[in-house]
Image (cartoon, rainbow, N blue to C red):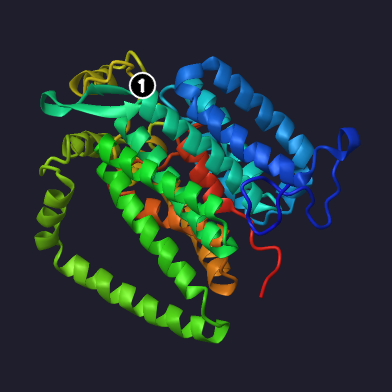
């Protein structure tokens, strides 16, 4: 049995919420832990279990809201989450493949619901503990039973039990972030067990990111670590000083951004050398050129949600063959803005980016007003993914993916129950 200070196992009571089920076994805290552990492990196993995984997630997405509907309705961010599916829903009207768009739109609604089951919990610590257990267990098993696959220039890359190197890199990015959170709780609670688990998870995550050769995951991990540590340091100051620190930090960030834009032509080659990429960014530039041609023909509305990557269509088939994607699925243009423009057009892009920024601002306000480790963890994840959008396709959200569920949960996490 755990306390509310963040032990590895969930607590048994949340203030104002009564247990139910046989002899009160099903408590809100145990349910939060269950959602965190089961939703994430099933989504992580989706590439291996296929239809079985999809069926389990469908059952949870349907029954979960019936059990936890009050919790979801109490989350003020829930109403924003479903706006992400609005462009996809409308795109069924003009999609070049309406059945595919409808299929993936329904999956997107289910994915948002699964994320809200995680983010709406009254005990975020219990939810994060469930996420921690499933992600670390999967990453550890992947290190032992994983596989290597062909990569560029005759090289091979380790992908664990994931379907691609980027998926494996993202998995270990999450593992490292959950690890730094757990190690932090261990120090705060003076628990060597928690600290040891966190440290081991950080090492597993770093090893996985390096082995995946995913530059995006490496950059995200660096940004995430920096944000988590700096925001927790910020939280140690009294509220009056936090206002001044936030203003100074905002000014420094603005100046740094302006300087980066002014010196981008000199910085860009250095960044490529740092992450080991050529000027073509592992084929990304070629993909972007293809995307730009598609966008020019369907700028405002796009082709329809996931109406481009369809088996049998000549252009995606040629891309899959060029990039040696044997599964002929699960690929993207490696740029969030282009991916959105191709599928849901400029109008859809504005909706997605607008909702993302609104939710990110709300998470910033939670950390600014009442900084807590749980909200800082989720803020670090959402902000690091914002930075990676020019080089990775974060949106439109690939449905039922573990990374999608994690990001949506991080964006929509409910505000602290007790504000200061």
Count every numbered label the image shows and give the total: 1
Query: Tag 1, which secondary structure?
Result: loop
User: Counting other residues with Cα less than 10 Å from the Cα at mark 1, is it few (<14), some (14-19), or many (20 or more)?
Assistant: few
The spot of residue 144 in percent (x, y) is: 38, 26
**Residue at 14%, 43% in the rendered image:** 277
The answer to whether 245 appears left or right of 125 in the picture is left
Q: Is residue 301 among what the camera can see?
A: no
Quadrant location of residue 61?
A: top right
**Residue at 10%, 54% in the rendered image:** 269
The spot of residue 299 in percent (x, y) is: 33, 42
The spot of residue 53 in percent (x, y) is: 56, 21
Q: Is residue 132 among what the camera can see?
A: yes
- As drawn, 1 above or below 321: below
The spot of residue 246 in percent (x, y) is: 44, 78
**Residue at 55%, 86% in the rendered image:** 240
User: In this view of the protein, which residue sits in the foreground, 154 or 208?
Assistant: 208
The answer to whether 230 appears left or right of 405 in the picture is left
User: In this view of the protein, which residue sits in the foreground, 76 or 132?
Assistant: 132
Name the image quarter holding the C terminus.
bottom right
Quadrant location of residue 225?
A: bottom left
Quadrant location of residue 395?
A: top left
**Residue at 70%, 68% in the rendered image:** 418
User: In this view of the protein, which residue sits in the foreground, 256 or 196?
Assistant: 196
Label 1: which residue?
Answer: 329
* Residue sticking out furthest to the front: 192
* Residue sticking out furthest to the right: 23
């Amino acid at each position: 049995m755990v306390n509310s200070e963040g032990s590895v196992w969930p607590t048994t009571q949340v203030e104002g919420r009564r247990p139910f089920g046989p002899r009160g076994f099903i408590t809100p805290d145990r349910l939060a832990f269950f959602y965190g552990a089961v939703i994430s492990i099933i989504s992580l196993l989706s590439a291996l279990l296929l239809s079985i995984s999809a069926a389990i997630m469908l059952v949870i997405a349907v029954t979960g809201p019936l059990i936890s509907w009050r919790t979801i309705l109490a989350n003020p961010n829930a109403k924003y989450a479903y706006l992400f599916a609005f462009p996809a829903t409308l795109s069924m009207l003009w999609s070049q493949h309406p059945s595919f768009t409808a299929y993936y739109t329904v999956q997107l609604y289910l994915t948002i619901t699964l994320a809200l089951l995680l983010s709406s919990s009254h005990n975020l610590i219990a939810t994060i503990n469930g996420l921690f257990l499933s992600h670390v267990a999967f990453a550890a098993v992947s290190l032992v039973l994983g596989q290597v696959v062909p990569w560029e220039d005759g090289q091979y890359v380790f992908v664990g039990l994931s379907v691609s190197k980027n998926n494996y890199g993202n998995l270990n990015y999450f593992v490292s972030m959950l690890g730094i959170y757990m190690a932090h709780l261990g120090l705060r609670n003076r628990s060597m067990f928690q600290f040891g688990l966190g440290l081991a998870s950080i090492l597993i995550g770093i090893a996985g990111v390096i082995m995946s050769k995913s530059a995006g995951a490496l950059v995200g991990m660096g940004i995430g670590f920096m944000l988590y540590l700096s925001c927790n340091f910020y939280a140690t100051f009294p509220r009056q000083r936090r206002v001044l620190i936030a203003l100074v930090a905002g000014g420094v960030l603005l100046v740094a951004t302006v300087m980066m834009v002014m010196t981008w032509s000199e910085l860009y080659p250095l960044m490529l050398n740092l992450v080991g990429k050529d000027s073509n960014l592992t084929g990304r530039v070629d993909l972007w050129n293809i995307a730009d041609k598609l966008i020019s023909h369907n700028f405002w509305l796009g082709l329809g949600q996931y109406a481009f990557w369809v088996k049998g269509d000549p252009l995606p088939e040629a891309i899959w063959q060029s990039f040696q994607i044997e599964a002929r699925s699960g690929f993207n243009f490696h740029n969030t803005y282009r991916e959105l423009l191709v599928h849901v057009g400029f109008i859809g892009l504005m909706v997605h980016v607008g909702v993302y920024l609104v939710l990110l601002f709300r998470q910033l306000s939670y950390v600014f007003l009442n900084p807590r480790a749980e909200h800082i963890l989720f803020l670090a994840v959402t902000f690091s993914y914002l930075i990676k959008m020019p080089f990775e396709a974060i949106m439109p959200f690939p449905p039922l993916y573990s990374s999608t569920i994690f990001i949506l949960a991080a964006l929509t996490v409910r505000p602290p129950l007790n504000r200061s």
